[in-house]
Amino acid sequence: MSELKVLGACPLDCPDGCSWVVTVRDGEAVGLRGNPAHPYTRGALCTKVNRWLERAGQDDRILHPLRRVGAKGEGRFERISWDEALDEIAERLGSVVEEFGGEAVWPYWGMGTLGYVQGLEGQAGRRFFNVLGASAHRADMCSAAGGAGLELAMGSAGGLDPEDLAHARLIVLWGTNTLTSGHHLWKFVQAARREGAYVVAIDPVATRTARQADEHLAPIPGTDAALALALMNVIVGLGAQDRDFLRDHTLGWEEFRERIAAFPPGVAATITGIPADRIVALGERIARTRPTAIRATQGLQRHGGGGSALRTLACLPGITGDWKLRGGGLSYSTSGHVPLNKAALHRDDLRPGPVRRLSMSRLAEGLLDLDDPPVKALFVIAANPVASAPDQNRVRRGLARDDLFTVVLEQFPTDTAAYADIVLPATMQHEHADLHDGYGHLYLAWNEPAVAPSGECLPTTETFRRLARRMGMTEPALFESDEELAEQALSGGHPYLEGITLDRLRKEGFVRLAVPDPFLPYADGFPTPSGRLEFRSETAAALGHDPLAGYVPSGEGADAERAERYPLILISAASHFFLNSMFGENAELRRRADGGPVLRLHPDDAAARGIADGDRVRVSNERGAFEGTVAVTDEVRPGVAATTKGYWPRLSGGANANAVVAERTTDLGAGPVFHDTRVEVAAVPLR
């Protein structure tokens, strides 16, 4: 009996980007654990990924190509060969391109894997679609709004190294549930606490993380920028601003100071629902505590004013001067510091000309409303948009079109796969090679395949190599190996990549970017047009936005007229047991997630509707409805209904929270507005 330890990396849409070790015995993966040598992972995985190998062996895993034999949405398929699948795809795709042009094809990449070879970062197969002249896919579902806002203020969404939270003396966890969505950061929070740091959580819900903090503030969803401006008002009122940093490293301070003056704590209290004295107390704490670290992640920016919220939040450490201190500043995503060569991976130079860009978070619009040309072929890659995209009912109607040819690359029979004409079986992470970073740390990792692919599953790269051959394409770039693709990603020549080669990554498993130590990316300037933190941005003005950072009210959340009909603001945050919609089919994790949607309501809101703890309820607006079990608790603030995302509709009564979410976009970055949704809740009569 032979046993191997194979180094790899978790592929999931999580900031922690864990390094892992697969134990292989006689060609079978029999164990998986976090890599104890990785400074961020430190031997631990999460509740979800601990069940990875169990999930890989589930009976419902898709192991062979399938052709639909029932109506779209029924999920009835027959097994076919790879040759049959490729022949049919090539014929149907060729017909679409000949009649409607390449832009009638939409490659829809999701967050099922973030890899640079197999996944979203590299958009595996993008070279194939470029040669075809397909529409370009805009992956805006996750962090687009916040990233756009931070780029206007800072020139980059990259912030402080999350590991440096250990050096902070005040940590503000703003709109982020660390213990659920990136729990490896918590050890650095705890290290800071051992040195006397104070931890504040700002979240409309008393999450796992908020309950562990020293203090919790619960603002009305979508009002975070108003709170940030009020905190800055308190700091400036105390004369605690860092005048040297403001003079040397910021732009537009005097104008921005006037904006701050318009948000005293009393005004912000009315907007945010947080008592003025608590705003004053936190402002005073920030004013006197250096360094202060703010950790803000994706949940904060999923409303109509989400881009402006992050833009404004980035200004706060500019006023206190925390950007120059180790352990100070804002942490959102480290992706802005990772200089991998995406242009070399994507090869957009292979396109025959300019192409239209289609938004991931506006799938229903793309399938139902577009013409010139309409979308006639859809490739869904590592995505389950029926479960994950806004306006679920319209998404279904779009996918049900008889004239839409849909190919889904998948591992499991998702709600989306049920609408496919052809389903192609995809490998899982321990079965293929890939290159990864983590958007919550500064390490690169190589994922070495530990075992052979299951059944007839293929890596996504190989699927598109075969399809390119079947369609008679001859461009050499379409047939490069996974290792060649990884080497091209590492080829940019940036100083942060010095000494990092594929050979080294394969030997060591992971390597930290060659950043300075300590890493203070904005101590001496910012990658903005002015080289300064821009309270005032001419770029914003040129794009038609307010040149000054500030508070932009949310859409539905701030709509008083709509509030008469739908009084509750719905938040559908990350689940502790699913990753987006991944793991939503795992029986044990579904059981631990209460089997179906749970809706948390404040006692006052429940009493006003005659709802008791444990009742079955219907959550609805004019777009649709879903059902769940209510938990009456003061862990959610009045006026808010809180649930979690990731439930598969077909396993949860036919719908999840996205049935009521609008296909609108944010003020900056055109991201989705999952947390900007007004609903009403009513008890479901006993049947």
Image (spheres, grey):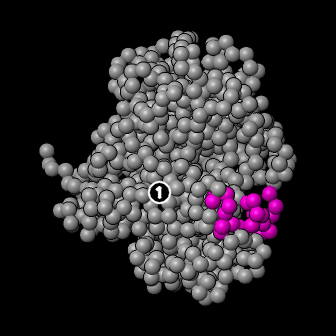
Q: Amino acid at mark 1?
A: Gly
Identify the residue under disc 1: 304
Question: Which SS class for mark 1?
Answer: loop
Quarter holding the C terminus?
top left
Q: Position of residue 336 (x, y in %)?
A: 70, 53
**246 left or right of 669?**
right
Count neighbours of disc 1 (C-alpha within 10 A) and say few if under 14, some if 14 to 19, many if 20 or more: many
Whether 332 is drawn above or below 253: the answer is above
**Which residue is rendered at x = 21% and y = 66% of the image?**
608
Residue sitting nearer the eye, 426 or 370:
370
> Residue 246: within the magenta?
no
Whether 329 is drawn above or below 132: the answer is below
**186 left or right of 539?**
left
Residue 558 seen in this snapshot = yes
Whether 193 is drawn above or below 380: the answer is below
**656 left or right of 155?**
left
**Which residue is rendered at x = 57% and y = 75% of the image?**
259
Q: Overall secondary structure of the magenta stretch?
A: loop
The image quadrant that residue 402 belongs to is top left
Tell me where the magenta segment starts and ends, as one range.
515-541
